[in-house]
Image (tube, rainbow, N blue to C red):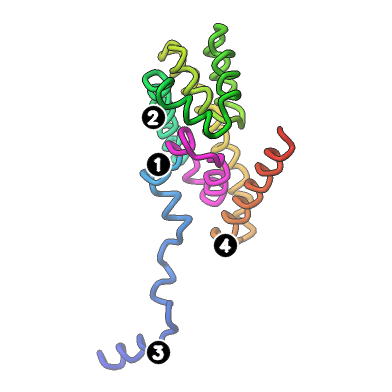
């Protein structure tokens, strides 16, 4: 009997035994460390918006959407705090020379001027809430010596609204898309590609 069972298993199509293995979208949506690192990178040096990655994951895995939002929210707070410290401690010797080299000094100066006018909370809040580069606001807030507590509260509230709002919407949309039985890997990749194309078009036309 054992020989027959062994022979039967050998006759199974290759890959059948791995059919129940979780796909890469499942692994990424369930990886707290991976998502936190992505969020930290997006709030510091990564030029691509995090939504292009996490929104498709939320839609593809709606039951994990709130957990994903929580993880990336915490990762963003850590990254924003780190860049505030970089701006506070290293603005003149490091930040400004690097921005000059990249041709971004004027954008940074414009943001620092907005922050120094006394609108620290609302400037950081709006930049953090809207799809705009966050790095200039975090570096600028540190460079002008803005109140860290005010800065941190603005980031906490705005990114909380942004990420948890996306999660709630993704739960609503994802549950309905699930009935279409689209493989998650194709759904996530398709949505990510569409979001990246949309973001690229916005950059080209200057929105």
- Disc 1 vs disc 2: Cβ atoms closer than 8 Å? no
Residue in the image at 43% along x and 20% along y: 92
Q: CA distance from mark 1 to mark 4?
A: 26 Å
Q: CA distance from mark 3 to mark 2?
A: 52 Å
| Residue in the foreground of this view, choosing between 145 and 125 | 145
Q: Which residue is mark 1?
A: 37
Earlier residue among tags 4 and 2: 2
Q: Which residue is mark 2?
A: 78
Earlier residue among tags 1 and 4: 1
- Disc 1 vs disc 3: Cβ atoms closer than 8 Å? no
Q: Nearer the viewer, mark 3 or mark 2?
A: 2
Earlier residue among tags 1 and 3: 3
Q: Which residues are magenta?
A: 39-65
Can you say which quadrant of the picture contains the C terminus?
Answer: top right
| Residue in the foreground of this view, choosing between 165 and 138 | 138
Q: CA distance from mark 4 to mark 2?
A: 34 Å
Earlier residue among tags 3 and 4: 3
Q: Which residue is mark 3?
A: 11
Q: Which residue is mark 4?
A: 183
What numbered label is drawn on residue 197? none
- In the figure, 182 relative to 193: above or below? below
Horizontal and vertical percent position of residue 110 = 60, 18
Residue in the image at 60% along x and 30% along y: 132
């Amino acid at each position: 009997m054992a020989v027959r069972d062994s022979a039967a298993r050998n006759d199974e199509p290759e890959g059948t035994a791995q059919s129940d293995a979780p796909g890469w979208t499942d692994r990424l949506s369930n990886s707290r460390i991976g998502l936190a690192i992505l969020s930290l990178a997006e709030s510091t040096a990564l030029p691509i918006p995090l939504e292009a990655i996490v929104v498709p994951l939320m839609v593809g895995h709606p039951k994990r959407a709130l957990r994903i939002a929580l993880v990336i929210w915490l990762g963003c707070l850590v990254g924003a705090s780190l860049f505030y410290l970089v701006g506070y401690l290293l603005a003149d010797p490091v930040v400004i020379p690097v921005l000059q080299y990249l041709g971004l000094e004027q954008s940074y100066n414009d943001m620092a001027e907005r922050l120094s006018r006394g609108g620290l909370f609302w400037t950081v809040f709006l930049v953090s809430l809207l799809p705009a580069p966050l790095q200039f606001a975090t570096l600028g807030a540190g460079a002008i010596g803005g109140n860290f507590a005010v800065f941190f509260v603005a980031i906490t509230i705005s990114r909380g609204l942004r990420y948890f709002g996306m999660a709630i919407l993704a739960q609503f949309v994802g549950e309905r898309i699930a009935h279409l039985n689209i493989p998650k890997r194709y759904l996530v990749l398709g949505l990510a590609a569409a979001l990246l194309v949309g973001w690229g078009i916005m950059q080209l036309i200057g929105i």
